[in-house]
Image: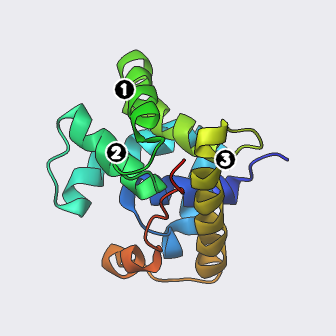
Amino acid sequence: MAITTSQKVQGLAIAVFGAYAGGYTEELETAVDTVGLSAVAGSALNIQGILLATDLSEDSVWIDRVLSHLGVTDTDPAYEAAVGAMEDLVSAFGRAAAVVAAVEYLLGDTVADEFESIAAAFQDNVAAAEVFSADSTDLDVGDLIPRTPQPVASPSA
């Protein structure tokens, strides 16, 4: 099944900010339809550190933050594989392309066995974000961040 614009927007908001898109949903969906998800991701990444009040200038810190938003924790059996994949993507294509690739991979129909529980939890989080954001007018990012459930670690192998 194809990934919808709504899923892409909510997935990107969760991955970048750890928050639902809320009242920004319609504007973001229009932007994704107009300029593409990578361009929207690039714009979001320009303000990510400011909104999260975190220095994300080091790729390793940024990767760890994005992975935690995606539900990948350092205790997860898939953590090292996820870090390696993100490092390769960031090195080859940049942060915007890396976060888009991660979101689209986890929302896709086929993921590696080690990422199945992470993908399922992320897809559930995106679905909850779609429900919450459908009629939301809330533009306060501080209000939207607590709306995301805590990451669910995959069971140990």
The residue to which callout 2 is attached is: 45
- Is any part of residue 87 visible from this angle? yes
Which mark is nearer the camera, 3 or 1? 1
- x%, y% of residue 142? 31, 77
**Amino acid type, label 2:** Leu
Question: Label 3: few (<14), some or many (≥20) within 10 Å?
Answer: few
The residue to which callout 3 is attached is: 33
- x%, y% of residue 106? 62, 46
Along the viewing direction, whichever of 23 and 48 lies nearer the viewer: 48
Element assignment for label 2: helix
**Amino acid type, label 3:** Asp
Q: What distance separates the C-alpha of mark 1 from that of mark 2?
A: 16 Å
- x%, y% of residue 33? 67, 47
Question: Label 2: few (<14), some or many (≥20) within 10 Å?
Answer: some
Q: Residue at x 47, y 59 (%)?
A: 153
Q: Which mark is residue 156?
A: none
104 sits left or right of 153 in the view: right
- x%, y% of residue 1? 85, 47
Image height of 54 relative to 92, above or below: below
Q: Residue at x 37, y 59 (%)?
A: 17
